Image (tube, helix red, strand yellow):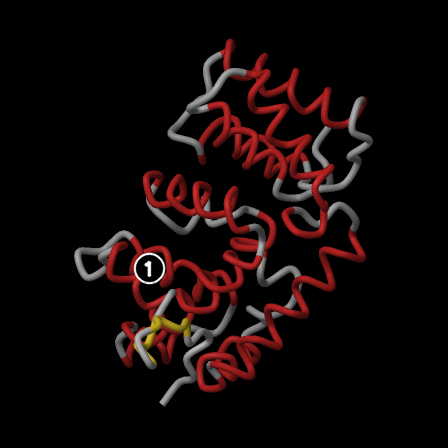
Amino acid sequence: LDFGVGHDQLINILMKDHGGNIPERGIQSLTKVLHAARDSLGIEYCLWLPDITCLLLSFMPESYAYSTIREMIHEDSSYFLAVSRVEHLAWCKTFADLMRRCFPQTAAIMGQIGALTPLGLDPIMKRFFVTLLKREHVMRVMDIFTGEGAHVIFRIGTTLCCLSHAHLGESIRERCDNAATFWEGVRRFAHSKHFDFEIFLSQVYMTKKILGFRRPVFPRPEV
C-alpha cells in the first residue's frame, strides 16, 4: 500500500517527515484513506498520494480527505496527480524542460549532477516538497495546489531551484557534485532566515501591470 513510494520512504513518512512519529490513531486514519483510494478509486500508483493524504488529514477528518482525493481523480486526474509511472516520468521530463528553458544556468548545474533525472527530482516529484520546505510552507503549497492543480508544483519547484542555487556560496557550489547535496542546499536555504515565503510566492507569481491589468509573467528567465 505504498503507491510506488517504496517501503523506506513510507517509513520516513510515518516516522519522521510529518513532524515526527505519526500517532497510532493517525496511522489508522492514513491507512483507511489510502485503502479507500486504492479499493474504491482504483489508484495503484501515485507517488504524491501518501504525503498529500497526511497533509489533508492534519486539518480535516478521514471522510473529507477521501472526498478531496476523489474529486481530484474525478475532475481530471492529470490536472492534480500522476497516477501511472509513465505519467510521472512525463511530468519529470516537463519539469526538466522548464528548467532548461527558463533557468538554463541552474539547469546546467542540476543536469551535470543528476538532479534533473526522475530519481534526482524525488524531493519535488515524489515527496511534494515535504523534505525541502518548512511544515507551514508545505501546507501553503498544499492549499494552493488544491485550488490550482499540479502546475503550481512546476511554478514553485523551478523557482525554488533557481533561487536556492543563486544563494549557495561559491565554496558550496564547488562541493555540490551530486543530487543529494544539491537538495540539501535547497533545504538549508528554505529553512534559513534569508527565505521569506511570502516574498518567494510573489516571485513565483511575478506580475506586471499592463494597460490596467495584472498579467503573470511566469516563467521569468534567468538573467
Q: Nearer the viewer, residue 132 or 87?
A: 87
What crowding class fits label 1: few (fewer than 14 Cα within 10 Å), some (14-19), or many (20 or more)?
some
Is residue 99 shown left or right of residue 217? right
- Rendered location of residue 14, percent (x, y): 52, 26
> In the figure, 77 relative to 155: above or below?
above
Quarter-of-image position of residue 30: top right
> In the figure, 177 relative to 135: above or below?
below
Q: Residue at x 67, y 41 (%)?
A: 5
Q: Which residue, given by chain and number where applicable, does mark 1 sit on?
A: 201
Q: Residue furthest bottom?
A: 223
Q: Residue at x 63, y 47 (%)?
A: 80
Q: Nearer the viewer, residue 148 or 59?
A: 148
Is residue 200 shown left or right of residue 81? left
Quarter-of-image position of residue 94: bottom right
Secondary structure of the residue carrying tag 1 is helix
Is residue 213 shown left or right of residue 114? left
- Rendered location of residue 11, percent (x, y): 57, 30
